[in-house]
Image (spheres, rainbow, N blue to C red):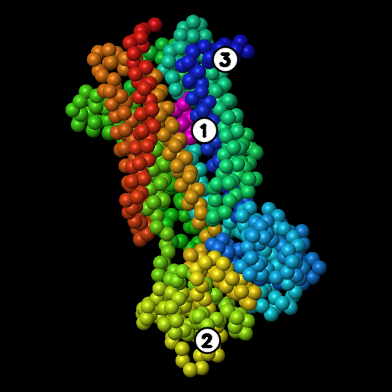
Amino acid sequence: MRTLALGVRIAFAGGRESTARMVLMAGGVAVGVVLLLLSLATLPAMQGRIDRLAWHRTSAASAPTAPDPALWLPVTDWYDGRQVIRIQVAALGPRPPVPPGLDRLPGPGEVAVSPELAELIRRVPDDQLRDRFPGQVTGTIGPDGLISPEELVAVVGRTPQQLRDTAGAYEIRGIEQPGDVIDLRGIIQVMIILVTVLMVGPVVVFVATVTRVGAARREQRFAAIRLAGATQGQTGVLAATETALAAIVGAGLGWGGFLALRAVATRQVTMDGTLFFADDLTAPAWQLALVLAGMPLVAVATTLVSLHRVRITPLGARRRRRPRPPQGWRLIPIAAGTLGIVLANRSVDDETAQLTALVLGVGSPLSILVGLVLAGPWACMWVSRGMARLSRRATTLIAAHRIASDPYTTFRAVGGVAVAVFAVTLGATETPDVDAGARPVLDPGVVAIETRGAPDAALTPLATADAVVARVRPGGQLVVRCADLARVSALTCPLPARLAAGSHPVDLPSTGYAEPEPGDQSLPIHAIYVPTDGSTAARERVRTAAAAAAPYALARTAPEWTYDPDWELDGAGNGLALVLAFVLLVAACSLTVAVVAGLMERRRPFALLRASGVRLGELRRIAMLETAVPLVVTVLGAMLTAMAIQYVINPDAWRLPGAGFFLALGGGVLAVLAVCTLTWPLMDVATRHHTMRFE
């Protein structure tokens, strides 16, 4: 206990320098805890969201969950660019399957809606939305049945006869349960793991960097304590106490910061265009405990490792040897990871090979990331040699010598930025495999109603005088006048030959298109294209009329044709961009702290240089060269590595990023360097003549 008390006294006995060091360590641990908790909360949040989405995939093949069956008719509808899930149900017994979020299945004439849809119905005229849900609103769908607080969902009760007479309805015996193989498996899980690694890596570097602030001065202080008679164990306890105090405070601040950011994130961060529930962004209790206890332990371990020379012998703090130069074997993990990606992308059929491909798909990118970290010091060593060979000024030669003396420390400062750039470039060089020719070319304001088997008699109110009616022959050939199609779309007559081969920008069947012939008026209606003035009210009135006339019909405008129901995570790119911006911020902070720490440790040599005639501006140039040149080289190396890997993964989809990407990347690197200039005033204070005194 006396040793602990002495450690507390020593921690605060160094004046402003000790206070600044404690504040930096507490802040670094706090940032690390916030980022780790956010990353750990990501996977449970997405899994919970997708688990609640499972019931939307209910089908006739879903496993039984109730004694009695029910009729089920789901339709994906839209309102002003927002997706509306409309499900019509009819119980076929007293105990039918019930969707989550409801206590019972709505009966005929009853409607259960989500809170957001109920609010929207109150604000919007009935002929634009409310009339799509025949019946009286008698219930509200709870959070268990919603993937987001903003989701628009309605469960409409009907009689069995009404649904039997409606195309598209089918019988179910159960509600689809979470855990299907498409629920967050494969590439989605790999992406989340990689994002977590990208967040954790720079955070660990940052925590280790701030923990080592003033390491040289601390070594000397504890070396003096060893010479005064302290044992190795007592020295370790004193050092651990100093770091643990700051780390524990930082862990508490980080937890509070996480709770504050979670509240902000649930109001700002979206996935698939909708927000998260506040309870979704919660790390599991055991992970929370592990982070809050583990981050201080990491900080303490870093401190003890940095004092190993003092613990061996008190004179070890004065005997600094130049570290062994890094060797070329550090490039092996990058080569191995690239080879693993090549093997993982080979077409396989059997389950064992698919499992191997999945393992390679996860392990190979991690191997490359580890390789980047290992190869960084090797690259910095060659940077120093190049600077020394090309130097024409003493300042450049001094900076090169400093990098060569310890390339490991140099890369630790810039490594976070290199990892972030690597991840950004991977995303920027990937092109989605989308057939642009298959996208719609409908004119703005045109509502395309795909009838989906509705009887022609029900569609009569929709076939207005200015509407274009497309019928279909038994073989699947669309029958419509070309001039009419051109009136509601960007197509011109005669239609391109590719349409006959199956391309369908206006939902033409695969067997192509034909001009009407005598007798074709009796063919069933396949689609109706209704022009409007483009206003929201006009579009939604047409959609509401379509829902009332043909409940199974799909009514969409041009922007909604791009929606892919099999890809529910299309908004995850925004989250990835936010994560990478956060990583760049942490990397900038880590770089700044590393520059400050280096200046604090070398202020006496810098002061001697200044006293010998080196100008203050030249000292600042030395410090900037030590940071800027390795940063630029490692960033370029990470970017080129990512481009090469993406090309290996998919040469056909690879593309060179646009000028905007390179401008943004250059701006980010310049911003990181600009943050380092904040340490320039400290250079003047740290190199004044009184710092040359020797105790």
Label 3 secondary element: helix
Number of numbered discs overlaid on the protein picture: 3
Who comes first in sequence, dot 2 or dot 1?
Answer: 1
Residue sitting at 33 percent across and 10 percent down?
A: 689
User: Taken as a whole, is the magenta stretch helix, strand or loop?
Assistant: helix
The answer to which image quadrant residue 233 occupies is top right
Q: Quadrant of the C terminus?
A: top left
Residue 364: percent from left, percent from top: 43, 47
Question: Can residue 413 be seen in this snapshot?
Answer: no
**Which residue lies under the disc numbered 3?**
8
Q: In screen coordinates, is 199 left or right of 494?
A: right
Are the residues at dot 2 and dot 1 in contact (C-beta closer than 8 Å)?
no
**Pair 1/3: label in front:** 1
Question: Can residue 189 be seen in this snapshot?
Answer: yes
Q: Give above or below for 12 relative to 496.
A: above
Mark 1 residue crowding within 10 angstroms, few (<14) / some (14–19) / many (20+)? many
**Which residue lies under the disc numbered 2?**
474
**Amino acid marked by disc 3:** Val
**Which residue lies under the disc numbered 1?**
31
Q: Which residues are magenta?
A: 202-211
Residue 309: percent from left, percent from top: 43, 17
Q: Disc 2 to disc 3, how far (Cα)?
A: 87 Å
Residue sitting at 41 percent across and 14 percent down?
A: 317
Residue sitting at 73 percent across and 63 percent down?
A: 137
Who comes first in sequence, dot 1 or dot 3?
Answer: 3
Residue 81: percent from left, percent from top: 54, 62
Residue sitting at 79 percent across and 66 percent down?
A: 95
Does the magenta run of residues contain 82? no
